[in-house]
Image (cartoon, rainbow, N blue to C red):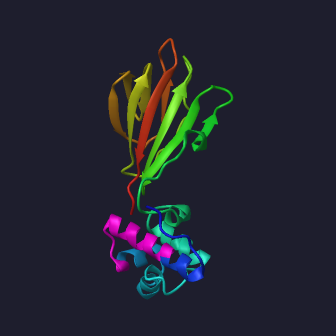
């Protein structure tokens, strides 16, 4: 069920405030914790959450950053399913390698789901080390993929899964004779 359309600024302020409150509750943050993470005072946050005060762009961006999300995520509906149609996924094809990356979802702060489709022999870019505590889960849908991280290398086949800490440079390659497809789930801790 969708909420009624936003008719004026007061309704927009209330909707934004409700989204902030819902995200804060989902993370288990107190107003004081969010204030510390965002740099916005607890009193201001309280008024924003209740729709009594419209957040300036600067404060809205700071609040989103404090909640570990993009400001756009706070403007979306918090109730009901979030559907992204097949044609709307962000898709990038690397010109040199033919590796296709499709962003599937960002279901929660610090969590993203990506699909890679790789021609035989193709290799991903070298990814820089992520912040401490970041983990990546690779699930191989099709083909044979080798994941290189730090001093370790893991060979995976269709149906295999591996979870690795990614606090060092890393990459992955299709070592099979046909196309490979995998789902990558990235979990980055939210402070």
Residue 93 at x, y percent in the picture: 63, 33
Name the residue at 52% across, 72% down. 62
Name the residue at 55% across, 17% down. 121
Residue 12 at x, y percent in the picture: 55, 76
Quadrant in which the C terminus is drawn? bottom left
Work out whether residue 126 can be spotted: yes
Residue 75 at x, y percent in the picture: 53, 66
Q: Residue furthest right?
A: 95
Q: Is residue 177 magenta?
A: no
Nearer-the-camera pick, 175 or 1: 1
Left or right side of 152 for 3: right
Q: Is residue 25 magenta?
A: yes
Q: Which residues are magenta?
A: 15-32
Reply above or below: 134 against 140. Answer: below
Reply above or below: 62 against 9. Answer: above
Left or right side of 70 for 190: left
State how many labels appear.
0
Reply above or below: 159 against 82. Answer: above
């Amino acid at each position: 069920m969708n909420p009624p359309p936003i008719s004026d600024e007061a309704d927009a302020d209330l909707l934004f405030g409700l989204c902030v409150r819902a995200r804060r509750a989902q993370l288990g943050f107190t107003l004081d914790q969010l204030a510390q993470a965002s740099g916005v005072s607890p009193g201001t946050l309280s008024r924003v959450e209740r729709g009594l005060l419209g957040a300036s762009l600067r404060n809205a961006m700071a609040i989103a950053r404090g909640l570990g999300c993009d400001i756009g995520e706070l403007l979306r509906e918090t109730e009901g399913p979030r559907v992204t149609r097949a044609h709307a996924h962000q898709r990038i094809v690397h010109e040199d390698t033919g590796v296709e990356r499709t962003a599937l979802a960002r279901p929660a702060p610090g969590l993203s789901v990506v699909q890679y489709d790789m021609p035989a022999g193709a290799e991903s870019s070298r990814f820089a080390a992520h912040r401490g505590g970041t983990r990546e889960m690779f699930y191989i849908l099709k083909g044979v993929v080798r994941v290189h991280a730090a001093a370790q290398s893991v060979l995976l086949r269709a149906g295999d899964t591996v979870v690795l800490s990614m606090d060092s440079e890393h990459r992955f390659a299709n070592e099979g004779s046909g196309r490979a497809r995998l789902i990558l789930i990235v979990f980055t801790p939210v402070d």
